[in-house]
């Protein structure tokens, strides 16, 4: 479920140098990023005691403020439907509140008076602490919140008051929202979601005046941290066309094809939607049956080839597989407006044709990741309806096929938001990467929005050099037609699992998938929850089914190589006749990576061993050209 890097730079002379100062070849009174000397002299005249560093920072703030205004002016208007919920939700909330007010007035009044009492009690306690010169009273029973790690949140009377009042406010707001009784259960879930967003947004850590970490850093650096933070903010807004999208990673730390996505291979076929990469063998013999991997086109494929030590692509080649991987082209504004699910399924079939022709085999095995797995399931159902048995076995990574329960995405899969998306794709032809990134980020707002913003804009820190976050920021668009079909036909209407979904003129159903299949889901996945993955998997018509549950989330649970015992996994012999919980209760836990467990399933379904296949020179070396296209 993302952000680009901010301006940065350090010179050898000063650890607090501006980017322009780092690039300057020699000191200059008028170097970019440095205030003119007459400006410093003027500030010194007004206040001779003002430190030179502080004067310089004030001048830089003035310059950055002008850039900020210009950057914000670049912002393009978006449909109101993608900015917030429609009037129907507000109406449902108002009606639910009136219902609760009518049926339980005493309960609501009691909640209000309880809030007043707690607030007055806290204020009196803080006043007493201040008057007596005492440190604040610790509340050891309060749940630990990582946002309040600084000791000042408990020892300083002011910050203690701010923190405890915020916690009282948050509890009161949550309780008030819980009292709302809308008739629609979807409205109930959406009210809860937006309430959490509001509570997180109003945390005192998000504001400079009530963030002790940011204030301490500003004093220690004579305001330099705030200037750096403003530079980061301006750079993010400039880079994102007037939108505030906080950078999560140092984008200059990685180059695709140089220090990530370096597995040796060749682009052997190029299609308007994808490049087909065949990876070079590292074993003398390989399994007879080739393997093709379909990653999601909502992200780029090299999540599976970040570094040699955590590359699933490199591991599979090392296990003796002739591996082909799809690298999707990044859809372009307006050009790809009419690319739909049919086009992607057709691309799957074309890629399979190429693999079979190049290896001379009658069958292949296939892997689909996330939406790539959803589309693989559609393709398999279509092949069955045609009597085409080219796929011997299939594997699904964190794949949803039954959308009867949409979890945290319920908020967005309603007509108000989908209507806004319809307007956006009608205007631009694509569902933009920035809009998708924002949506996924707010599923974990404290971790992916507020905490990075505090580090970048208040503390003035440079984002970390982290390969996974670099990949996350290397965003992709979605074609307009495909986005509408996926969101309305598969997610909202749940056509594939209920009633059928039409692909290339043929109505297909989830139960049509009847070949040997294996699914890997992740225990803490908030994008494709494992219970929902399991439910869809259990609805297939396959007799040969294996389900593996990995620890961790949507990415870390998949990119979990052997050799490090960080996340384990579960397997179960309970079958799929009962519930997911029944399967889990009968499961056994295995330490370490699920890759070898899957390998034990895949190898006997991949034929005998033959001489390794050399992909040749092809059209370009891996990772190809499409992977470098920006959103």
Image (tube, helix red, strand yellow):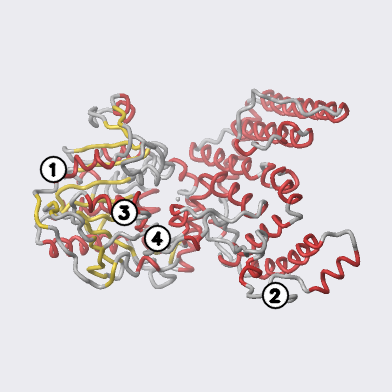
Where is residue 164 shown, x and y percent of the image? 71, 32
Q: Determine crowd level at label 2: few under 14, some 14-19, many 20+ residues with C-alpha closer than 10 A.
A: some
Q: Which residue is mark 4?
A: 259
Q: Which residue is mark 3?
A: 372
For the point 47% across and 42% down, which residue is it?
Answer: 408
Q: Which residue is mark 2?
A: 31
Give the mark nearest the N terminus, 3 or 4.
Answer: 4
Q: Which residue is mark 1?
A: 604
Give the mark nearest the N terminus, 2 or 3.
Answer: 2
Between disc 1 and disc 2, the foreground one is 2
For the point 65% across and 29% down, which residue is it?
Answer: 102
Between disc 3 and disc 4, the foreground one is 4
Q: Gap in Å between the C-alphas at discs 2 and 4? A: 34 Å
Picture quadrant of residue 333: bottom left
Q: In screen coordinates, is 462 left or right of 622?
A: right
Where is residue 528 shown, x and y percent of the image? 38, 43
Q: In screen coordinates, is 149 left or right of 128?
A: left
Q: Gap in Å between the C-alphas at discs 1 and 2? A: 67 Å
Q: Gap in Å between the C-alphas at discs 1 and 4? A: 34 Å
Tell me the SS state at disc 3.
helix
């Amino acid at each position: 479920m993302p952000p680009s890097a901010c301006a940065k730079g350090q010179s050898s002379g000063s650890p607090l140098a501006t980017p322009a100062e780092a690039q300057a070849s020699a000191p200059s009174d008028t170097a970019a990023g440095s205030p003119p000397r007459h400006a410093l002299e003027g500030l010194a005249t007004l206040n001779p005691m003002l430190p030179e560093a502080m004067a310089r920072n004030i001048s830089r703030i003035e310059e950055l403020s002008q850039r900020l205004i210009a950057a914000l002016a670049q912002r393009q208007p978006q449909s109101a439907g993608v900015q917030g919920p429609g009037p129907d939700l507000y109406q449902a909330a108002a009606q639910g509140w009136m219902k609760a007010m009518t049926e339980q007035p005493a309960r609501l009044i009691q909640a209000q008076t309880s809030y007043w009492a707690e607030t007055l009690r806290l204020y009196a306690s803080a006043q007493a602490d201040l008057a007596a010169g005492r440190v604040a009273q610790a509340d050891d029973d309060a749940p630990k919140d990582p946002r309040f790690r600084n000791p000042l949140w408990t020892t300083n009377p002011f910050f203690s008051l701010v923190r405890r009042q915020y916690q009282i406010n948050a509890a009161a707001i949550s309780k008030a929202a819980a009292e709302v009784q809308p008739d629609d259960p979807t409205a109930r879930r959406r009210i809860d979601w937006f309430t959490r967003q509001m509570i997180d947004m109003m945390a005192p850590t998000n504001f400079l005046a009530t963030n002790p970490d940011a204030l301490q850093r500003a004093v220690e650096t004579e305001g330099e941290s705030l200037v750096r933070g403003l530079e980061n903010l301006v750079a993010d807004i400039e880079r994102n066309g007037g939108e505030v999208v906080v950078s999560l990673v140092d984008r200059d730390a990685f180059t695709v094809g140089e220090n990530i996505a370096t597995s040796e291979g060749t682009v052997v076929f190029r299609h308007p939607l994808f490049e087909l990469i065949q990876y070079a063998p590292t074993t003398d013999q390989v399994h007879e049956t080739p393997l093709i991997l379909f990653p999601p086109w909502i992200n780029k494929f090299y999540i599976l080839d970040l570094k040699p030590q955590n590359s699933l692509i490199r591991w599979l080649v090392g296990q003796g597989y002739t591996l082909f991987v799809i690298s999707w082209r990044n859809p372009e504004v307006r050009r790809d407006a009419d690319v739909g699910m049919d086009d992607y399924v057709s691309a799957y079939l074309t890629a399979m044709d190429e693999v079979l022709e190049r290896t001379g085999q009658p069958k292949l095995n296939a892997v689909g990741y996330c939406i790539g797995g959803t589309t693989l399931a559609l393709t398999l159902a279509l092949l069955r309806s045609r009597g085409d048995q080219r796929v011997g076995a299939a594997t699904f990574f964190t794949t949803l096929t039954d959308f009867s329960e949409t979890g945290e995405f319920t908020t967005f899969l309603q007509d108000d938001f989908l209507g806004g998306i319809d307007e956006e794709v009608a205007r631009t032809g694509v569902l933009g990467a920035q809009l998708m990134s924002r949506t996924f980020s707010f599923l974990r707002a404290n971790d992916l929005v507020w905490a990075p913003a505090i580090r970048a804009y208040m503390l003035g820190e440079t984002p970390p050099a982290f390969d996974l976050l670099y990949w996350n920021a290397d965003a992709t668009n979605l074609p307009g037609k495909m986005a509408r079909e996926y969101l309305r036909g598969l997610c909202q209407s749940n056509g594939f699992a209920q009633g059928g979904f039409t692909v290339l003129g043929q109505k297909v159903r989830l139960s049509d998938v009847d070949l040997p299949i294996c699914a890997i889901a992740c225990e803490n996945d908030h994008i494709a929850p494992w219970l929902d993955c399991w439910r869809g998997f259990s609805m297939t018509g396959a007799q040969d089914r294996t389900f593996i549950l990995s620890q961790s989330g949507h990415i870390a649970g998949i990119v979990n190589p052997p050799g490090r015992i960080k996340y384990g996994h579960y397997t179960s012999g309970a079958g799929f006749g009962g519930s997911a919980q029944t399967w889990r209760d009968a499961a056994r836990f295995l330490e370490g990576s699920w890759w070898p467990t899957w390998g034990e399933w895949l190898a006997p379904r991949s034929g005998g061993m033959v001489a390794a296949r050399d992909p040749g020179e092809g059209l370009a070396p891996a990772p190809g050209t499409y992977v470098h296209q920006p959103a």
